[in-house]
Amino acid sequence: MTPFFMAARSSLVATILLTTAIAYAGWAGYRLGQSTGEAALRRCEAETANRERERASEAAAALARAQAAERAAAEAIHSLEAQLRERENDLRAALARRASATRACFSDPVRRLLDGPGASTTVPNAAAGVARADATVAAAAGGPGHRREPARATSERAAAIWAAEAMTAYERCRARIDALRQWTETVHGR
């Protein structure tokens, strides 16, 4: 073999060896990058799963707080409702004993004002005794043959019961608003 071929052969062998070494280094770098990337992906997936578990745990705790606050508010309202019913019944019984069913409390002009625009409830109608008593007084004042339309005055008892019902309705409304406010503070921290 000639020296030219020998030199070419060694150059070819060196080129093949160099190409093989470069290819192997590239493949090794690729595998290293791939395994590093896969490890980073696994870490990222694990961190994401941990964050999702934490969020789910926080949401479950918030839901539990909201449900506990709802139960507490409902129990408070039911308790207050029972107290208000008992108080209203006691008040009605006391009014039935003490307030007159025949003495006028609100005259017809006052009734019209109270029943006017914007009234949320109407003043109760007069009891029969109020109209008879008022007609008797009017007949006596006007003399014989004096005809007057019966008054629509409200009796003292009817007005007192009406006021007691309004007080109870107010207390119910106030208690519900307080329960909603407390629930909102518990759930939203406001």
Image (cartoon, helix red, strand yellow):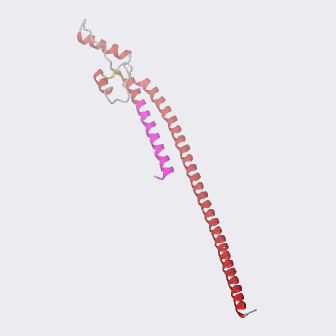
Left-right relation of 22 to 133: right
Task: Assess whether residue 174 is covered by the magenta stretch.
Answer: yes
Q: For this rendering, which residue is in front, 13 or 5?
A: 5
On the image, the x and y values in percent for residue 152 come to: 33, 18
In this rendering, position of residue 119 left or right of residue 46: left
Farthest residue to the bottom: give it.
3
Which residue is at the front of the view, 135 or 77?
Answer: 77
Query: Which of the 4 quarters of the picture holds residue 137?
Result: top left
Q: Identify whether 11 is placed above or below 84.
A: below
Give 107 or 34, whichever is nearer the viewer: 34
Which residue is rendered at x = 59% and y = 57% of the image?
52
Q: Is residue 38 above or below residue 86?
A: below
Q: Please, which residue is most extreme toward the right here?
A: 1
Residue 23 found in image quarter: bottom right
Q: Position of residue 107 (x, y in %)?
A: 30, 22
Which residue: 44% across, 37% down?
173
* Residue stretch rendered in magenta on the structure: 165-189
Spot occupied by residue 79 in the image (x, y as percentages of width and height): 53, 38
